[in-house]
Amino acid sequence: MYFNRELSWLKFNERVLFEGMDESLPLMERLKFLAIFSSNLDEFFMVRVASINQQISAEYSQDDISGYTPLEVYGEIRKHVLKLIKTQYEYSKECIKELGANKLNITLRKNFKPDLLKKLNKYFENEIFPVLTPMAVDFSRPFPFVRNKTLYIMTKLRVEDSYRSALIQVPVNLKRVIEFKVDNDYHYVLLEDIIMENIEKLFIGFEVESSCLFRLTRNADLEFMEDGADDLLMVIEQAIKKRQWGDVIRLEVSHNVDKWTLNELTKIYNLNDDQIYKIHGIMDQTLWFSFSPRKKNDFSRKVYQPRIMPYMKKKNIFKTLSEQDIFLHHPYESFDFVLDFIKQASRDPKVLAIKQTLYRVSGDSEIIKALGDAAEAGKQVTVLVELMARFDEENNIEWAKMLEKKGVHVVYGVYKIKTHSKITLVVRRENKRIKRYVHLGTGNYNDKTANLYTDMGYMTCRENVGSDASVFFNMVFGFNNAHNTRYLVISPNDLRNRFYELLQQEIEAVNKGREGFVIAKMNSLVDKDLIDKLYEASQAGVKIKLVVRGICSLVPGVDGLSENIQVKSIIGEFLEHSRIYYFKNDEYKMYLSSADWMTRNLSRRVELMFPILDDLISERILKTLDLYLADNTKSWCLDHKGKYHKIEAKKKEVFAHEILKSLKYDNHVDFVKKLEESM
């Protein structure tokens, strides 16, 4: 009745990999997807596989909802990962050949020619050698600490009648891929290959028997004790420092590693054979993110410029919001409108207070600067910075400290649960009364990812929504547990039950002879109890169409259980990140949310769901959902056996991302009309 979440996630990453193998994409775009695949897999091992390892070590053997024990799912993970990385490395070799055919030569060590070697050796002497620190291992010098996800070279040295090992970290502050010109050809050479070619210069007087590249992946899930701590910020800072010291989960090593060297690494880290992954190609293919060769733009997708809507050109955002609710679909419509909303609020003398939740922000966030400016201008600025945003903890700590220095009141999340909601409240005095302006979203306040992720935002100054927003902020900033809200649905207290109620309404509609219909779009669907409610709705005759980008534990299309449920996934140019929920028989029908249908979102996080109160906006979102359901170019359909099938266009191609990029419209009515024509 349920698919395993880890194996389902691997199938998501497989779809990412297959997107990188789509020959219709520009070459640099394909390499980017190979890098995304590697980055995703790193995080999967650091968090999910690490958790399974801990269960195995604790001899926990209970089946999960899919019927797997931790040991069984670990075995399945390894089998799938070996298959996927073999495919990735084979295809990356094809991409390297294609680069070479376009005079962008990725020249590996085995292909170094004398003229190139001269340049490499000179570069090594001048630029690399001064940075390197070879670390010998012997009785007085134990094996040095090896950082998470960092490349190292292990060298086997002959010392009289025995062997010794030495370590060299491949510098992370030097370029990984370096350009050299020989005659009229450009060569792109890996930093680690240059070091290995010159390895003997680091061990003069010793015989170098062999060298190999390796990389560790460590358990990076934060573990800390909150109980008895006076300062959560300090506790998390200490936990982050320990992250680099986590248990080793995976060893990646060159496929031609010397047997003695592999035995040494295995003993040092107490590894089992199933934790070792021999790599037949370039190790750590996240390098493609930073690979920037000459003529790069000739092999890249044209950078998309978000649309500037007519209302965005008006200078007074508060006047605009007083006249209409605003809907934003990123990245198709500019995120600058959200930035301008907060900037204007920071400068406007009529604004009394700004309240906001921040989960992830960009490295040079304009929002952070605007909030600081507002506080310095004497406005009441209160911000909840979620310190536990995974792998963004250090950034968020820095932002929190910076904001506090500017006079912003900073709250570090709600005790023991993450705050994942996306909301901003601006309180303004107008005509001797208080007026509240609210922005609600499905994605983070991050101007960089807003150009890469599809998300939706809703802005309004409706009094009842503003009142609910005040209740929400009183709850997360203070000790107010009252959830007396009409429009905003808040987890962990209310959201799960609200979804049950919405599904029950559809069941009751079918029982009364009407059509029951649900469309839900999200990142992941894992929660068992909610899946069971979906099964109940399907058995009652409710038609359910799901667009689930990543993990899906629900089994669709099973007679007597889920025959009325369809599941598809879209993987394309933009990361599908919006959470949209449509219930045909509800008063509001259309909802947006920060929450996926995962147990953590419904039971262990502060999340928000909100109805769309403007009928034209609601109709527009519904038509957008229709487009996602009709997509037959970048879509995959999930069957009852857990296999994803690429949907092929039988007649007309429907490519949701391209249609939304190219559509020309000035308002919601125009959008709906043009979209219907394009489909």
Image (cartoon, helix red, strand yellow):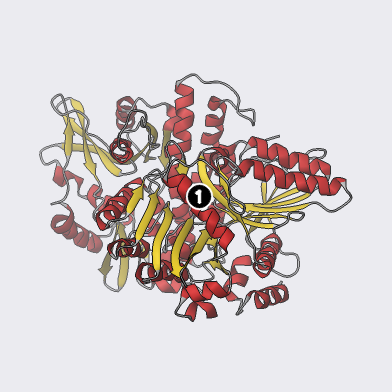
Residue at the image point whose x is 62% and y is 41% from the top:
496
For residue 220, side relative to residue 500 (left or right): left
Q: Is residue 239 visible?
A: yes
Report which quarter residue 50 is drawn in: top left
Q: Quadrant of residue 590?
A: bottom right
Name the foreground residue: 258 vs 59. 59
Image point (71%, 37%), residue name: 532
Total label count?
1
Residue 138 sits above or below residue 394 on the image: above
Residue shown at 38%/32% (left/top)? 223
Which x, y percent locates residue 508?
82, 45
Q: Which quadrant does the C terminus fall into?
A: bottom right
- Which residue occupies the extreme top position in the image? 59
| Front residue of this view, candidates 419 and 16 | 419
Judge whether residue 548 can be spotted in this image. no
User: In the drawing, does residue 673 fall left or right of residue 327?
Assistant: right
Q: Position of residue 101 (x, y in %)?
A: 43, 68
440 or 334: nearer the viewer: 440
Mark 1: amino acid: Phe
Which residue is the site of mark 1? 472
Residue 124, percent across and down?
Answer: 18, 55
